[in-house]
Image (spheres, rainbow, N blue to C red):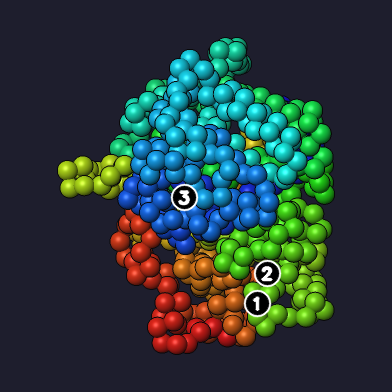
C-alpha cells in the first residue's frame, strides 16, 4: 500500500502494537463508535440476536456515541460504506438515520459484492450500482462529501468504510476471494505470491475451535495462497482510496488541519495453526491490526510500540478535537504526542484513587526501572482485554441447525489479558529457540519493536483450558507456559483479567483500582511486592461456565462478583 505508507506512514505515526479487543466486525465497529468494550455494549457477534444491526438498533446504542458528541459540538458528520453487519434500511422505520449522522450513506443489499453494491442514503430506498467497483464508488462519494464540507467551512467527521479486502458474497452464505478492480486483475501475477508461513503454520492448538477436519496439504495451501493474492489485489484499490482522500484534502486546503486515521476492525488468520481462513480468536493474527494517523501535532515518520486498542479511538478523537471525555468511556486517549500522553497519564492516575502525587509516581517508576535494568517509562496503561463469543459463527442458532460446526463456533468463547510491561515475568524457556523468535522469514508485524517491553497473553477458554505466552520469546504462540510459570504471576494475571471481565468506564481504564482501592497501584509492576501475595492467592479464579454467544455476567464468574456481593472490595 504505497499511498498509505507515503501519506500516513512517512507523513504520520504508526502504532505497531495496536489491538482490537474483539476481533470480529460488528462488535469491533460498535466499540469504535461508542468507546465501550463489547461486553459493555453486549454486541458480541455479527448476527442477530447477539449482534448485527438489529441488535444495535434495539439497544439504541446510537444515543450516546462519537457521532452524536461531535455533531453536538458543531461538526458535520458523515458515513459512507459499511456500517454494521446485516444493515438494511428495511429493518428500521423508513428514513431512520443513526443519531448523530448528518449524512449516512451505508452499504445495504449486496454489501460484500464488490461489483454490484447497493447503498441507502439516510434510510431511504437503496440504490444499486451494477458493474461499478465498490471501493472506487465509496472513494468517489467520500470526495464529494469532502467538497461539501470544505464549502460549509465547519469541522467534520467522515467515516469511510470499504468492505475490501473481505471475502466476496452475494448471499452471505457462499463466499469467494475478494474481486479486484479490473486495473489490478493481473497484479503480482509473476511474483509467486504465497501467504506467509510462520512457525505456527501446520501446527495444531487443541484450544482453538475449528470448522471440521483440516489437512494442510497442497490443496489447502493453494486455497490460502489464492485468497491472500486476491486480498492483496483488492487492497491496492483501498490504497488508491487513501491516496485520493489525501489528494482531495490537499486540493481543498484542508490537509494540514485534518486528522486522517487508517485502521481495521479485525485481523485474519489464513493457515496459522492449521486453521481455515477466519477471525475472532485471541491469536495475534486476529487481534493485531494496523493503525496509522496523520494530522496537526502528530509526529511524521514515528512508529510507536505502545499497546493501544480500538476502544481508545473515540477518546483519542475527542481529545484531538479539544472536547471533554465522558467518564463512561472504557478507552483512553492514545499517547501519540506529548499533549495526548499527558492526557492519557492523567486519566490513568485519576482512576487509581486516591491518586498519588506526581513525585510519588516518578519515584516509583524510577525504582521499578532500576530493579529491572530498564529505563524509566511514562505512565501508560499496560493491559487490554481480549474477549470473544460466537462472533463469527452461525447467523441464527436453532435446534434445527445446531450442528457440529455451530458447537465449534460456540467454543470460541474466551477472555484474555494482553499485558505489555517493562518487567520480565517469566524465566527463559528451553523452547524459546524453537518458537520463531529467530525466524529469518519473520514479518515485522509479529514483533513489538521495543527492547524494553515484553508482552504477555493469558487466556481462559470456556472449556476450562488456560494459556500463557511470552510474546517476546514466543511471538507465534507455540510454547504455552501456563504450567511452568510462577504461581504468584499467574495469580496476578488472572486477578487483573477478572477485574476487566465485567469492567465499565474507570475500571476498564485502570483495572488495578478494583484490586487496590486504597490507591497508588496503576500498573502490573505495582502488584508485584510479596506483601500482596496472600491477597492475590486468595482471589477466586475466572471461570466461564458454558460456551455462549452472549455476554451473560453470571456465566463468567470472577472474584469481582463475590466482592460486590458481600460488600467487600476484595483488594488492598
- The span from disc 1 to disc 3 (Cα, nearest Å) is 28 Å
Residue located 52% across and 79% down the image: 536
Q: Is residue 348 left or right of residue 480?
A: right
Residue 556, located in which quarter of the rendered image? bottom left
Element carrying mark 2: helix
Callout in the foreground (1, 3): 3
Judge the density around disc 3: few (<14), some (14-19), many (≥20) Cα neighbours within 10 Å. Answer: many
Q: Which mark is residue 27?
A: 3
Please state which of residues 338 and 329 is positioned toward the viewer in this rendering: 329
Q: Which residue is mark 1?
A: 352
In the rendered image, the vertical position of residue 357 relative to residue 236, given as above or below: below
- The span from disc 2 to disc 1 (Cα, nearest Å) is 7 Å
Element carrying mark 1: loop
Q: Is residue 177 left or right of residue 341?
A: left
Q: Is residue 181 visible?
A: yes
Residue located 56% across and 71% down the image: 507
Please state which of residues 431 and 133 is positioned toward the viewer in this rendering: 133
Q: Which residue is mark 2?
A: 348
Amino acid at each position: 500500500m504505497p499511498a498509505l505508507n507515503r501519506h500516513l506512514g512517512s507523513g504520520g505515526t504508526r502504532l505497531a502494537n495496536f489491538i482490537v479487543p474483539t476481533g470480529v466486525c460488528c462488535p469491533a465497529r460498535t466499540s469504535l463508535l461508542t468507546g465501550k468494550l463489547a461486553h459493555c455494549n453486549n454486541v458480541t457477534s455479527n448476527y442477530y440476536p447477539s449482534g448485527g444491526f438489529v441488535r444495535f438498533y434495539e439497544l439504541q446504542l446510537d444515543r450516546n456515541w462519537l457521532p452524536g458528541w461531535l455533531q453536538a459540538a458543531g461538526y458535520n458528520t458523515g458515513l459512507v460504506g459499511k456500517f454494521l453487519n446485516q444493515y438494511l434500511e428495511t429493518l428500521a422505520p423508513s428514513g431512520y438515520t443513526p443519531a448523530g449522522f448528518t449524512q449516512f450513506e451505508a452499504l445495504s443489499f449486496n454489501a460484500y459484492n464488490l461489483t454490484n453494491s447497493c447503498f441507502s442514503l439516510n434510510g431511504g430506498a437503496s440504490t444499486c450500482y451494477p458493474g461499478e467497483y465498490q471501493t472506487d464508488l465509496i472513494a468517489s462519494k467520500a470526495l464529494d462529501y469532502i467538497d461539501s464540507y470544505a464549502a460549509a467551512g465547519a469541522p467534520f467527521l467522515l467515516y469511510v468504510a470499504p468492505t475490501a479486502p473481505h471475502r466476496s458474497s452475494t448471499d452471505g452464505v457462499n463466499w469467494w476471494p475478494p474481486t479486484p478492480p479490473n486495473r489490478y486483475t493481473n497484479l503480482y501475477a509473476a511474483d509467486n505470491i504465497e501467504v506467509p508461513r510462520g512457525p505456527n503454520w501446520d501446527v495444531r492448538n487443541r484450544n482453538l475451535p475449528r470448522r471440521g477436519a483440516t489437512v494442510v496439504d497442497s490443496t489447502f495451501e493453494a486455497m490460502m495462497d489464492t485468497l491472500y493474492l486476491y486480498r492483496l489485489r483488492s487492497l491496492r484499490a483501498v490504497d488508491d482510496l487513501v491516496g485520493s482522500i489525501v489528494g482531495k484534502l490537499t486540493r481543498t486546503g484542508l490537509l494540514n488541519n485534518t486528522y486522517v486515521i487508517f485502521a481495521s476492525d479485525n485481523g485474519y488468520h489464513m493457515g496459522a495453526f492449521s486453521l481455515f481462513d477466519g477471525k475472532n480468536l485471541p491469536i495475534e493474527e486476529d487481534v493485531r491490526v494496523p493503525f496509522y494517523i496523520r494530522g496537526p501535532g502528530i509526529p511524521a515518520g514515528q512508529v510507536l510500540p505502545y499497546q493501544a486498542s480500538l476502544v481508545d479511538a473515540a477518546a483519542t478523537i475527542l481529545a484531538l478535537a479539544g472536547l471533554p471525555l465522558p467518564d463512561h468511556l472504557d478507552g483512553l486517549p492514545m499517547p501519540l504526542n506529548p499533549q495526548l500522553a499527558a492526557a492519557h497519564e492523567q486519566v490513568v492516575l485519576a482512576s487509581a484513587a486516591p491518586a498519588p502525587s506526581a513525585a510519588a509516581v516518578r519515584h516509583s517508576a524510577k525504582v521499578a526501572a532500576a530493579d529491572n535494568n530498564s529505563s524509566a517509562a511514562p505512565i501508560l496503561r499496560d493491559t487490554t482485554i481480549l474477549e470473544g463469543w460466537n462472533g463469527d459463527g452461525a447467523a441464527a442458532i436453532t435446534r434445527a441447525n445446531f450442528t457440529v460446526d455451530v458447537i465449534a463456533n460456540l467454543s470460541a468463547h474466551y477472555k484474555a489479558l494482553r499485558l505489555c510491561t517493562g518487567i520480565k515475568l517469566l524465566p527463559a524457556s528451553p523452547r524459546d529457540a524453537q518458537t520463531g523468535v529467530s525466524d529469518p522469514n519473520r514479518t515485522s508485524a509479529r514483533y513489538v519493536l521495543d527492547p524494553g517491553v515484553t508482552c504477555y497473553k493469558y487466556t481462559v477458554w470456556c472449556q476450562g483450558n488456560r494459556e500463557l505466552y511470552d510474546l517476546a520469546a514466543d511471538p507465534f504462540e507455540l510454547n504455552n507456559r501456563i504450567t511452568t510459570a510462577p504461581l504468584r504471576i499467574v495469580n496476578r494475571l488472572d486477578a487483573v483479567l477478572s477485574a476487566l471481565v465485567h469492567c465499565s468506564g474507570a475500571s476498564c481504564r485502570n483495572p488495578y483500582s478494583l484490586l487496590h482501592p486504597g490507591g497508588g497501584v496503576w500498573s502490573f509492576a505495582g502488584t508485584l511486592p510479596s506483601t500482596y501475595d496472600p491477597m492475590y492467592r486468595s482471589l477466586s479464579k475466572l471461570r466461564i461456565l458454558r460456551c455462549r454467544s452472549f455476554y451473560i455476567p453470571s456465566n463468567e464468574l470472577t472474584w469481582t462478583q463475590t466482592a460486590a456481593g458481600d460488600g467487600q472490595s476484595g483488594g488492598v
